[in-house]
Image (cartoon, rainbow, N blue to C red):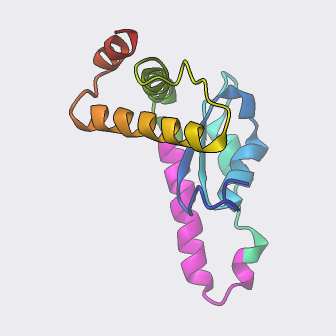
Amino acid sequence: MLKRKRLIRFGDAIIMDRGFYAYRNYLVGIRYGIVPLIIPRKNFRLEKLEGLISYPLFIFNSKNVDREKRRYRKLVNRLFKGLKEDLKKLRSIIEDVIKLGKEAFSLRRLHCYDYEPVRKKCSLSVLLTGMTIKLGFREKKVIQRLSEW
């Protein structure tokens, strides 16, 4: 659905929590051209995922097979590189930024019921959150203090 609405493009990474954890979800994400970074559970085995990944058949139906193989390998490499990072830290920073938008920039008290006012308020909140981070408030503790202020 995200791809159909053009909210994501080929090669984008999507961070998901444990509710989406399944080896099949990694394979489906790669097939659609995204990097699904799902926070793994304790029994996750990287070797098992490596064994499940293979080229999908639609790659061999394209005009330039070598180019499609390179693109697919690039996605797989980004997936394994992303899975080796600490996704819990990244997820907590994302939660803090969302909390900053809700608490500090008036998304908590959203008393609008029509599409246009909601869109304007949400756009303003996203803009102010982005400007805050762009101005240098990037550390976790600073973002938490801003959202509680």
Q: Is residue 118 left or right of residue 58?
A: left
At 42% from the left and 24% from the top, the residue drawn is: 105
Instruction: State the residue at coordinates (53%, 46%).
Output: 80
| Residue 58 in picture, x, y percent from top left | 75, 75
What's the magenta region? 59-82
Would residue 71 be counted in the magenta stretch?
yes
- 78 or 48, which is in the foreground? 78
| Magenta-span inclusion, residue 73 | yes
Asked where in the image residue 76 lies, by quadrant, the reply is: bottom right
Figure disc tally? 0
Query: In the image shown, does 42 or 118 lie closer to the viewer?
Result: 118
Placement of 10 over or under 142, stated as above or below: below
Viewer-nearest residue: 140 or 65: 140
Residue at the extreme bottom of the image, as rendered: 63
Could you tell whether 134 is left or right of 130 in the image?
Answer: left
Query: Which quarter shows the C terminus?
Result: top left
Residue 97 placement, left or right of 111: left
Position in image of residue 137 (x %, y %): 25, 27
